[in-house]
Image (spheres, helix red, strand yellow):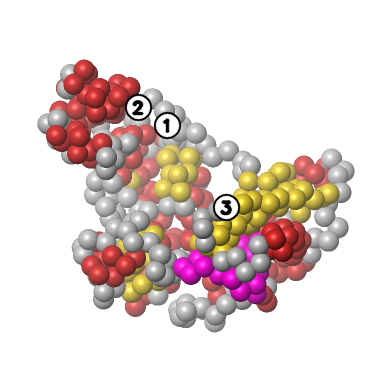
């Protein structure tokens, strides 16, 4: 997807279109999650400190991430992928590999399928995607980045070296900020030069990975697309712009995290047996605490009660300790129907009717939906078309 978080913000607020938009943490420790293409003109990039972004592009609209909204749109994008092929390997909310080798009879060539996917994403969601089509994962990934935004690049089997050889070596997966200057000092500036270089000359720079990098520089990659496996755990966490000590604020964030985890469980018809809380203090010391329940649950209130008890246990031993990061997760996941069919007790406290109403309202209204009282916080601005 093209500048995904920023694109979703523009979708929800048309006044953002055509102006620089930067999504990320807004505090002194914040970093850029996504910058739209209007902001990238000024040199703003993902993972850049937000302070640096503000220096480069002070006129941009700066927006705190709305992860629940991005997950909602991502799920609809992945529904489009899965209507083409079951072999979908997600890399993140906005990126995936698709093996479409078994889909050609129904949908045509790789190019035809790419055009279909792009058209469906545009038509159903109003967003653009860039697609790379090739006979292996490395080439497809590389091709998807060549003509952003709204790009489509097909790499023919007999055109690999013509495409790769002139490319700067810095585009190669795994060549980072430390290795790149050493390659340049050795006179290796392009894929082609790396592919043709003497192995012994590269060993001092690349060590025992020379063969790996030369294979990639030749366009060779034998990894298969691995369809996403069932979740083994689900978690959410939040790093605060300013360390928090206020108990109410921390519990409110813990409830928001619990809501997000519980909604994902219910969407997948899963139950969780173990609740895990993660806490990182101002000295970067990280601890996790967990507790296993007698019966699996996907109830927001049940999971929050468990998480709160774990957090308060830690708090009783660490009074007034500033908290930098708070996370909540679940493990021991089981499919709800499997547990019912086995005659195993479900969580007797599971507020199924309340959760069902909660989920339906948030499905229909997204960020303009509802939250449990402690977790409620007013939006920083209106979501157009929603009340």
Earlier residue among tags 2 and 1: 1
Asked if marks 2 and 1 touch (Cβ < 8 Å), the reply is no
Q: Quadrant of residue 258?
A: bottom right
Residue lying at 24% horizontally and 49% vertically, measured from the top left:
147
The residue nearer to you, when weighing 356 against 382, is 382
Q: Tell me if residue 143 comes above or below residue 15 in the rendering.
A: above
Q: Earlier in the sequence, mark 3 or mark 2?
A: 2
> Which residue does the numbered mark 2 point to in the structure image?
221
Residue 256 percent location from the top left of the image:
62, 67
Q: Residue at x 65, y 74 (%)?
A: 248
Q: Between tags 1 and 3, which lies in front?
A: 3
Say which residue label 3 marks.
286
From the top left corner, tell me how far across and down residue 71 is, in percent.
Answer: 51, 58
The residue stretch that appears in magenta: 240-258
Magenta stretch: includes residue 290: no
- The residue mark sitting in front, 3 or 2, is 3
Q: Is residue 34 above or below residue 219?
A: below
Residue 253 colored in magenta in the image:
yes
Q: Disc 1 designates what residue?
A: 101
Q: Secondary structure at mark 1?
A: loop
Viewer-closest of 313 and 61: 313
As displayed, is residue 275 above or below residue 59?
above
């Amino acid at each position: 997807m093209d500048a995904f978080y920023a694109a979703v913000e523009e979708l929800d607020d048309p006044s953002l279109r055509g102006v620089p938009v930067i999504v990320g943490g807004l505090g002194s420790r914040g970093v850029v999650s996504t910058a739209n293409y209007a902001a990238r003109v000024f040199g703003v990039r993902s993972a850049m400190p937000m302070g640096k972004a503000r220096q480069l592009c002070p006129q941009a609209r700066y927006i705190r991430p709305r992860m629940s909204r991005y997950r909602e749109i991502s799920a609809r994008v992945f529904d489009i992928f899965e209507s083409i092929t079951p072999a979908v390997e997600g890399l993140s909310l906005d990126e995936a590999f698709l093996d479409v080798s078994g889909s050609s009879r129904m949908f045509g060539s790789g190019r035809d399928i790419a055009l279909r996917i792009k058209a469906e994403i545009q038509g159903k969601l109003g967003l653009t995607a860039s697609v790379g089509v090739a006979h292996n994962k490395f080439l497809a990934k590389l091709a998807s980045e060549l003509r952003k935004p709204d790009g489509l690049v097909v790499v023919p089997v007999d055109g690999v070296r013509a495409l790769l050889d002139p490319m700067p070596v810095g585009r190669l997966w795994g060549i980072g900020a430390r290795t790149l200057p050493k390659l340049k000092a050795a006179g290796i500036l392009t894929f082609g030069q790396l592919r043709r270089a003497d192995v012994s000359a590269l060993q001092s720079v690349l060590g025992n990975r020379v063969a790996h990098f030369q294979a990639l520089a030749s366009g060779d990659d034998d990894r298969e697309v691995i369809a996403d496996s069932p979740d083994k755990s689900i978690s959410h966490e939040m790093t605060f712009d300013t360390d928090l000590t206020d108990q109410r604020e921390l519990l409110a964030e813990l409830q928001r995290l619990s809501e997000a985890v519980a909604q994902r469980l219910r969407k997948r018809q899963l139950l969780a047996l173990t609740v895990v809380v993660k806490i990182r203090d101002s000295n970067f010391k990280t601890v996790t605490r967990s507790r296993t329940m007698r019966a699996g649950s996907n109830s927001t209130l049940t999971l929050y009660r468990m998480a709160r008890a774990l957090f308060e246990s830690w708090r009783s031993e660490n009074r007034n300790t500033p908290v930098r990061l708070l996370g909540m997760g679940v493990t021991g996941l089981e499919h709800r129907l499997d547990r019912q069919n086995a005659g195993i007790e479900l969580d007797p406290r599971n507020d199924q009717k309340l959760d069902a109403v909660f989920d339906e309202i948030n499905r229909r209204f997204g960020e303009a939906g509802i939250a449990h009282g402690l977790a409620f916080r007013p939006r920083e601005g209106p979501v157009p078309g929603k009340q």
